[in-house]
Image: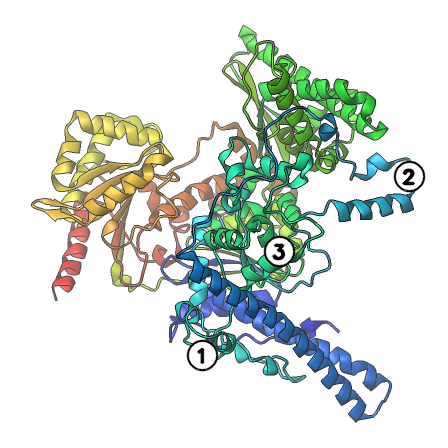
Amino acid sequence: MDNDDLVLPTPSSFPTFPYDPPYSIQTDLMRHVYTSIEKRQVTIVESPTGTGKTLSLLCSSLSWLVDEKDRAREGQLLQQSLPSAVASEPSWVAAQALDIRKRELESEDQEYEERLTKARKTEAHFRMLARARVTKKQRMAGDLTHDHLQEDAYLPDDDCEDSQDNFSPAVRALMAKIDKNNKRDPASQGDEPSCTKIYYASRTHSQLSQVLPELSKLKFKHLALGNAVPDAGNLSRASHDHCSLKKRDIEDVGDDQCETDQRQWRTVSLGSRKQLCINEDAKSRSGDIDEKCRELMEGKQNKRCQYLPPASDDTRMLDLRDQILAFPKDIEDLATAGQNMQTCPYYGSRRAIPQAELVTLPYNLLLQKTAREALGIDLTNQVVIIDEAHNLIPTLLSLSSVRLTSDLLLTSLKQVSVYYQKFRNRLSAMHALHLKRLIGFLDAFRKVVMDWMAEKSNAKSRRQDTEVVTVPDFIHRLGRKIEGINLLEIESYLKRSKIARKISRYAIDVSEGYNIITDFVDEKPRKHPSSVGTPPLHTIEALMLGLAGASEDGRLIFSIIGDAVEIKYQLLNPSALFRDVVEVARSVVLAGGTMSPISAVVSELFTYLPQDRLSTFSCGHIIPASNVQTLLLTRGPSGSDLEFKFAQQSDRQVVSELGQIILNFCNVVPGGMVVFFPSYASLNFAREVWSQSRLLDKFGVKKKVFLEPRESSGVETILREYAIAAKTHVDKKTGAVLFAVIGAKLSEGLNFSDDLARAVVVIGLPFANKNSPELQERMRYANQVESRSGVKNHAGGKDAAAEMYENMCMNAVNQSIGRAIRHRGDWASLVLIDRRFTSAAIRRKLPQWLRDDVTTCETFGQAMKHLGNFYREKRQRTIL
């Protein structure tokens, strides 16, 4: 019997939501998400920042999860009763069998809860001791210095089936089983039970850090163990009972009260080794910590990390797993738990995945199949929520792209060649064959790159230093010998044998131990890092995977950068990588404060989905309409049309008039004002012009001036100083003005609420550079796909490429607009400066919550009148 035969009706309300009553748009969003999950749909949700999006997503998805667990339990009980009915046994026999099964399920639940209760007591004990204890730095188990080279450590691993070609399948299977037991991954999950779960992903850990505080607000009541199993035919909604107990209260109450009042969701936060490693010696050494961790996990030469329990002792890892699941923990809490248990939190968090109900993780761990496999993540029939999903398409394209240089290619070839010459007499036949094929591929690749550079070095060919090559054309250039090689097979071999790390480690160890450097890099000796970094062959491996998997959708872009050649592999179709997630997950929710234009997401990711599998939701804002004013400014003070196309951005007269506009805005806008330019170049040119004309000094009379820094290191300081200045009112100076760049560091992910942004000004339309080879190929590819489908759904006669180009621009604009209006009581003006904003196609792609209430100002005087009235009304309300 399929559990989905017991259909879950969509709740009309969500009593577990912490605020009563929720806004109507919050209820609508929660009902939509619940329904989409139940119907196994992919849904795109747009909910403006400040509308409680994260809270609504958690409440709806976890409510469904509770009901799904009840449904699954009921399904098990019904399955138990079916055989008795078929056999026509007496009813009392069927009832007794059902009662026995109920008690078994209750016993399983009770046993698990007792383990978590014990873990909570242990955690409380550690919290009590934490105030007085000083954790001493532990010494490594064994010396990490290289006293001498042990060549056996550099031989490839034999856990790949190719290396056992001389054995029968039965012997191979037995060897694999024995090897697995002897060399088990610390995070190996074996036959541990798994459960339905919610995977909640966002772009950064700072964004994910907001999830657990929101989770603690939900009022899910913990079910008493005796009532955990519902009667057959009655789906329990006990999960929706009211409970006001907060996280901070739970820490101070008895265990019995914790177990019966507030439900503790089994949650795990996944992070990188860099964030979770508690081995101070490993962290203090230069180089790639991932590689260092793998070295210590192998435990060769008595160097195994003391925080990794041996395979024979699983108790510590299981205890840490229970600690992780006992109470929701963010990344910092995980590290603390690992230190308390003296057990690696990185592998402990992986061990907790199967039994977790909620898993939070960054984009890259969810979207890459190799990362999911490494973590043991199986998305089959699970619910996936991707927050801040406006970044999803760029992220997918970035994850599928590979960059390497001719220098890295040459280094890889020399490392593999020297390694093969050194160990060829000790390699099995299959290892030797694969390495010879790899050397052949790298050598052919090198010849193609050198020939291309020689051709471009010719004076007649220097007119174009970039060339885009299709995958079939590139494979053909490698020669007939390479065309017959299965690149996917070699890539698979590199992955299974871990040979890339072995070769890189051998190269560095030899160079440090014997000063044999020229074999690995070039003819001139060069100092190597003191620790193994990311092996060059890993980049080659990623490239080979791309070449083997996307012959139609992939492109290689050759460019001359200085004296070297840069080769970039780019996947043109972002849906290819994401399809692996969509096709196995039960439901996928893409959520963002600004997903407009939603049509762009559908056209680039979900054209293959049937209509009944795809749904969308977009809601208005929770703020009153009077709290936001959107103006389209089409003319400047001189009466000239305002259009900030690329040529106008470097026109002194146009930029000078723009300065006069900003100066007038400074005189009427209170608090902070954020002004977004289309590019760093346009911002820098404006600063130069305004400095020469002393306009910047005039800005400074009214507001303190700040400019977005180029380097990320300066962002935090600028934001801190701007926040102070924006709220400062001294003499004539009222607030601050911050000049930023659309699509840069300050245009997304930041909260400019209240006085930090009483106005957001967007200058021009930030269209991407059409001369970019990558963009040109994406646009060409979009038209080819549309031509093959024979379907055109774009307004105004635009083709797919033009539509995509426009969508990219408006997505960036919408993110900048979204920096203001961050909560229900917030208010601000949004001013879009460029006549092109008045076109129907552009206005249609503004966020839904503001697109229907936009005022077009045909004169500059009209704009100033609207601004003056808006701020005057807000000032009067504040006084009253």
Quarter placement of the C terminus: bottom left
> Image point 39% across, 54% down: which residue?
847
Depth check: 307 or 517 in front? 307
Tag 1, which secondary structure? loop
Residue 242 circle label: 1
> Image point 31% across, 60% down: which residue?
823
When asked about the image quadrant of residue 38, the answer is: bottom right
Q: Amino acid at mark 1?
A: His
Residue 316 circle label: 3
Contact (Cβ within 8 Å) of mark 2 with mark 1:
no
Q: Mark 2 — residue?
A: 167
Q: Is residue 677 visible?
A: no
Task: Return the x and y of residue 211 as percentages of the image width and height.
Answer: 45, 58
Q: Is residue 664 visible?
A: yes
Depth check: 815 or 710 in front? 710
Pointer 3 local density, CA inside 10 Å: few below 14, some 14–19, many at least 20: some
Mark closest to the chain's N terminus, 2 or 1: 2
Task: Return the x and y of residue 194 as percentages of the image width and height.
Answer: 67, 62
Q: How many marks?
A: 3
Depth check: 77 or 187 in front? 187
Q: Amino acid at mark 2?
A: Phe
